Image (cartoon, rainbow, N blue to C red):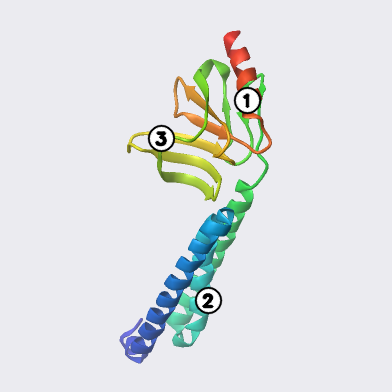
Amino acid sequence: MSDQEKAEFPLDDYLKAFKAFHIRFGVLFTVASVVLWFFNPEWLGYHMGITPIVAYLFFMYRTKSFTQTKTNKRLYLLGTSVLVAVLLGVIGLFYWSESDSDAFISDRGLEVTGAYGIIIPLEEIDSIALLDELPEIRTRIHGISTGTVSKGKYKGEASDIRYHLIVEHPTDLILYIRRKKGIPVFIALDGVSEMQLFAQLQEDLDQL
């Protein structure tokens, strides 16, 4: 802004609105997160990804009256456009992550379709196992986490450990695949019997 625009900008009123918004948003966001955690954890990931963007769009709309100068009007349009684009991208990412995944053995090896799917040639598999639970996960590097769904690349308990997760129901059996090269893969899909997939995979590996 120019010196004149800075002098005319109602900074005190804007800061009051800014403070009030973040106090209300912090309280409501926390309460909603706790409620979803106990009653519907599947929606918690959507809430954490979408709610802040919608809240800031609302805040920018409510403080639109502060953007009376040409510079501020352009910044307002730019800011809202970016937030809308990000919101659409996040919603699209969630929709993509919810697409049906499948796992099967083909002539190319073990194929997992859907979000963060992968193809693992049988000759690249070092060992397989069925687990009752996932290993300790510290943080997500990139991917999707919405309640029980975890798809993408994650860090393990140690900072140098990496995992590839394609998991939709971590409370059931999980197929663990250790590769000769590349990070381990964990698979647990709603439409797949991990027990049958493990047995079929073990039979094919024994014939190599």
Q: Mark 3 points at which residue?
A: 162
Query: Residue at position x 41%, y 38% from top?
Result: 136
SS of the residue under disc 3? strand
Q: Going by the image, does 204 lie left or right of 79?
A: right
- Disc 1 residue type? Met
Q: Which of 86 and 208 is in front in this view?
A: 208
Q: Mark 2 points at which residue?
A: 58
Q: In this view, does 168 lie above or below 60?
A: above
Query: Residue at position x 61%, y 8% from top?
Result: 207
Q: Residue 183 carries which label?
A: none
Q: Going by the image, does 53 lie left or right of 23?
A: right
Q: Residue furthest top?
A: 207
Mark 3 vs 2, N-terminal side? 2
Q: In this view, does 18 lie above or below 182?
A: below
How many discs appear? 3
- Disc 2 residue type? Phe
SS of the residue under disc 2? helix
- Disc 3 residue type? Arg
Distance of mark 3 from mark 2, alpha carbons? Answer: 38 Å
Residue 85 visible to the viewer: yes
Distance of mark 2 from mark 1, alpha carbons? Answer: 48 Å
Give coordinates of residue 83: x percent, y percent.
Answer: 51, 67
Give coordinates of residue 128: x percent, y percent.
Answer: 52, 21
Mark 3 vs 1, N-terminal side? 3
Query: Residue at position x 68%, y 42% from top?
Result: 100
Q: Quadrant of residue 208?
A: top right
Q: Going by the image, does 145 lie left or right of 95?
A: left
Foreground mark, 3 or 1, reads: 1
SS of the residue under disc 1? helix
Q: Do the residues labelled 3 and 1 touch (CB within 8 Å)?
A: no
Q: Mark 1 points at which residue?
A: 195
Distance of mark 3 from mark 1, alpha carbons? Answer: 24 Å
